[in-house]
């Protein structure tokens, strides 16, 4: 199904062609002056120079053609100085378009003719450490990007890409060794089976790492021992490898539970460790092909290009002490991903301060042939979540807040709002369940409604409000529609049962009021919104759309007696219209990664 603007542009383009002008001048856009018209075409302005005619003359000719050729499409067409073409859509045409959209599985959103195989890398947590607010934006934005790409028909894999390698593993192992030296993992003469149960809980593990990290900064001997343990582990020591498996398994169980609370799901749980086997051959090939060379004792690949406006340092593969870096692991991960599942696109989510890292990795991977030119490597750098003071969000004591505490805070804020409502109809237990659903919407919408690259202020009171541009407001609108549809179903249950028919089946009716038409116009823009959100990988565009659609629905609701409408056909037409609105809103919030409760 074509997008509405594409259909309208074809109509206007044909009118331009009939007047002897290029069809490309017929592009139609949503009006930037909705007080004057619904759509506009500025092609006459663009064509004036090419055809050496006054733009108002061209606009006048095209307008006459439109009136003669497309009377069933436009309610009103006019040429306005100095050469704008103002367009108002016919209610019958709009209703027919929405009837098609309602019957379409994608609600009028056309999908690309050629589908892609896409991987989204949007996790990045380190094992043995709890998720904190620094992991929030990557998870929330990445989950939405994954869902948007899937909705558009692509095959998409979400990868958590765990930090499960390197010195942090050695620090944990060494600290545990000094606390519990009798564990079999540290006995080089051990020849039996290692225990199946981990020798620690997630709570103990999360205490061990920061303790070991702090000790390594104060105790040089401990730091040296931790480095030695790291080296021994990375050489394949069986005891340390068995211990590492426990660390990863215990951590992943906890991470999955915390991501579940965010309604975030990964298809694969690979880590940096999975890329390690690919590093030696990759490095050797880069050396053999003449890309990698030694510089100040390190092995590097030059990635600077002619025309760079700032210095792009070489991509370091191996440090002078023989250690590898994140860049090495990321390059090897690309090798792994391309070998295991040939990809058309890899999308990375990370703090925007890592832009240089990804510039180096992307350039190195292309220069050395790890990916071909037709594989797209995309980096989405996101801004900082700040407190009301404009600084990175912290706990009251000044520390980095655990993600589960942040989720609890916003759920509590929503719960208080529910309980303070004089008209509430739910008990405390129901209120708690609803607060968890609405709190998730408040958290995710509060983040996603901002352009990803921008910093934003995290304001729990504003985000949890049931009014304004917030997640709870969107959910409240959906719940309002559910309530109307439930009342309608109850009132018509006997008729539907006896007739064996679906309630309110049939086409969308032509609008009879300004608010109804505005709602229909907003619904017709879903395809345009999705096309833009996908091409720019921009969830904030969906947020803006569902907010505008919610406003349009609520305006229509306040001005229209939906269930009290006396004319049966008109009443059922209203029901079909708000049912379509509910479907579009629910699709939108699903793409943002949250859902609506039955009641609020």
Image (cartoon, rainbow, N blue to C red):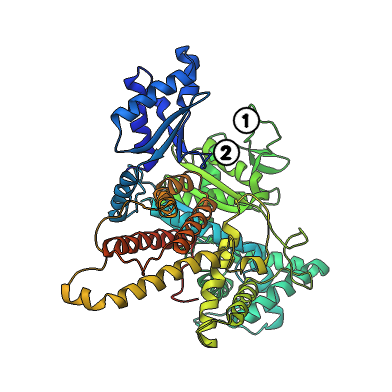
Q: Could you say which disc has been placed on residue 363 in the image?
A: 2
Few, some or many C-alpha atoms within 10 Å of disc 1 (few <14, some 14-19, many ≥20)? Answer: few
Q: Nearer the viewer, residue 280 or 134?
A: 134
The residue at 58%/44% (across/down) is 361
> Would you say 567 lies left or right of 360 here?
left
Q: Judging from the image, what secondary structure is the residue with disc 2 in?
A: helix
> Would you say 527 lies left or right of 551 here?
left
Q: Mark 2 or mark 1, which has the lower sequence index?
A: 1
Q: Nearer the viewer, residue 531 or 43?
A: 43
Locate residue 403: give its quadrant: bottom right
132 is higher (above) or lower (below) than 6:
below
**What residue is pinned by disc 1?**
305
The residue at 22%/73% (across/down) is 496
355 is higher (above) or lower (below) than 433:
above
The residue at 69%/31% (across/down) is 309
Q: Position of residue 169 (x, y in %)?
A: 64, 68
Locate residue 591: give its quadrant: bottom left
Locate residue 148: give its quadrant: bottom left
Pointers 2 and 1 in contact (CB under 8 A)?
yes
- Residue 264 visible (yes or no): no
Q: Judging from the image, what secondary structure is the residue with disc 1 in?
A: loop
């Amino acid at each position: 199904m074509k997008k509405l603007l594409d259909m309208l542009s074809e109509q206007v383009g044909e009118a331009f062609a009939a007047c002897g002008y290029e069809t490309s001048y017929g592009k139609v856009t949503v009006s930037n002056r909705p007080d004057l018209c619904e759509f506009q075409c500025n092609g006459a302005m663009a064509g004036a120079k090419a055809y050496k005619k006054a733009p108002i003359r061209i606009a006048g000719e095209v307008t006459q053609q439109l009136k003669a050729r497309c009377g069933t499409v436009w309610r009103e067409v006019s040429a306005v100085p100095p050469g704008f073409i103002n367009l108002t859509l016919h209610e019958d045409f709009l209703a027919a378009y929405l009837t098609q959209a309602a019957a379409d599985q994608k609600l009028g959103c056309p999908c690309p003719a050629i589908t892609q195989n896409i991987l989204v890398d949007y996790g990045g947590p380190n094992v043995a450490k709890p998720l904190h607010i620094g992991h929030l934006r990557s998870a929330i934005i990445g989950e939405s990007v994954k869902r948007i790409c899937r909705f558009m028909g692509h095959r998409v894999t979400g990868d958590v890409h765990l930090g499960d390698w390197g010195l942090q593993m050695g620090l944990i192992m060494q600290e545990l060794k000094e606390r519990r030296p009798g564990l079999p993992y540290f006995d080089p003469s051990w020849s039996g089976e290692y225990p199946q149960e981990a020798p620690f809980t997630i709570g103990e593990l999360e205490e061990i790492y920061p303790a070991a990290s702090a000790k390594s900064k104060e105790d040089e001997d401990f730091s040296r021992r931790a480095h030695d343990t790291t080296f021994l582990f990375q050489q394949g020591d069986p005891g340390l490898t068995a211990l590492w498996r426990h660390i990863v398994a215990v951590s992943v169980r906890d991470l999955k539970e915390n991501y579940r609370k965010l309604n975030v799901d990964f298809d694969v749980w690979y880590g940096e460790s999975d890329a390690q086997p690919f590093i030696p051959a990759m490095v050797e090939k880069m050396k053999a092909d003449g890309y990698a060379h030694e510089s100040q004792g390190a092995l590097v690949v030059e990635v600077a290009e002619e025309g760079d406006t700032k210095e792009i340092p070489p991509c370091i593969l191996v440090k002078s002490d023989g250690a590898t870096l994140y860049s090495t692991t990321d390059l090897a991960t690309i090798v792994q991903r391309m070998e295991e599942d040939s990809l058309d696109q890899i999308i990375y989510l990370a703090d925007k301060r890592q832009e240089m890292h990804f510039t180096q990795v992307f350039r190195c991977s292309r220069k050395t042939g790890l990916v071909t030119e037709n594989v797209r490597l995309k980096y989405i750098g996101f801004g900082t979540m700040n407190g009301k003071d404009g600084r990175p969000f912290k706990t009251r004591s000044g520390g980095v807040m655990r993600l589960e505490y942040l989720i609890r805070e916003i759920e509590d804020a929503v719960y208080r709002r529910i309980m303070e409502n004089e008209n509430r109809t739910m008990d405390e237990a129901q209120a708690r369940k609803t607060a968890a659903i609405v709190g998730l919407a408040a958290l995710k919408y509060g983040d996603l409604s901002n352009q990803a690259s921008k910093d934003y202020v995290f304001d729990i009171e504003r985000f949890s409000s049931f009014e304004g541009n917030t997640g709870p407001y969107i959910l409240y609108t959906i719940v309002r529609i559910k309530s109307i549809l439930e009342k309608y179903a109850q009132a018509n249950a006997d008729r539907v049962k006896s007739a064996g028919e679906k309630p309110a089946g049939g086409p969308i009716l032509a609008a009879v009021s300004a608010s109804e038409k505005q709602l229909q116009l907003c619904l017709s823009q879903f395809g345009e919104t999705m096309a833009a959100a996908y091409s720019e990988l921009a969830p904030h565009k969906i947020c803006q759309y569902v907010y505008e659609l919610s406003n349009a629905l609520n305006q229509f609701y306040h001005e229209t007696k939906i269930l009290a409408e006396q004319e049966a056909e008109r009443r059922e037409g209203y029901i079909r219209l708000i049912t379509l609105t509910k479907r579009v809103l629910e699709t939108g919030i699903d793409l943002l990664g949250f859902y609506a409760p039955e009641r609020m």
